[in-house]
Amino acid sequence: MKSKLIFKILVGLPVLILADYLVMVILGCTSCIFGVGDDYYCGVYCVIGKGILLLSVFLFVWYLFPELKKVLRRHSNAEGN
């Protein structure tokens, strides 16, 4: 069980970070093509980036939660015996 958790962390986290990066790059390039000003990048773009990052954290925790629950349950059962 721990190996599956470690695999999810070592593979899932970099993939999620890469996806976040690609979304922000595509959003930034699209914004540049449409000619938005500097105020956009210092305001709205940062808020969107924070939202995407927060959503990614929630998705990553949701992705890991079943494995963490199994590991913690197994650990608590081992201590009780």
Image: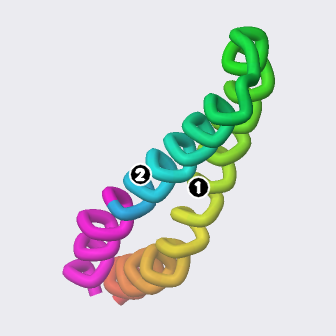
Q: Where is residue 8 in the image (x, y as percent from the top left)?
A: 33, 74
Whichever of labels 1 and 2 marks the residue nearer the N terminus, that label is: 2
Q: Residues within 10 Å of mark 2 (few under 14, many from 20)?
A: some
Q: Is residue 70 magenta?
A: no
Q: Is residue 6 left or right of residue 58?
A: left
User: From the image, which quarter does the N terminus lie in?
Assistant: bottom left
Kind of residue at badge 1: Ser
Q: Give the range drawn in magenta.
A: 1-14
Residue 11 numbered mark, or none: none
Residue denoted by label 2 = 17
Q: In this view, does 15 lie to the left or right of 62?
A: left
Magenta-highlighted stretch: main secondary structure? helix
Q: Residues within 10 Å of mark 1 (few under 14, many from 20)?
A: some
Residue denoted by label 1 = 56
SS of the residue at dot 2?
helix
Q: In this view, does 5 lie to the left or right of 55?
A: left
Q: Is residue 58 above or below residue 79?
A: above
Which one is in front, 54 or 64? Answer: 54
Q: Is residue 5 left or right of residue 64?
A: left
Q: Quadrant of residue 10?
A: bottom left
Q: Position of residue 3 (x, y in %)?
A: 20, 80
- At 73% from the left edge and 37% from the top edge, which residue is drawn? 48
Kind of residue at badge 2: Ile
Q: In which quarter of the image is residue 45?
A: top right
Q: Where is residue 36 in the image (x, y as percent from the top left)?
A: 75, 23
Q: Where is residue 40 in the image (x, y as percent from the top left)?
A: 76, 19
- At 68% from the left edge and 25% from the top edge, which residue is drawn? 46
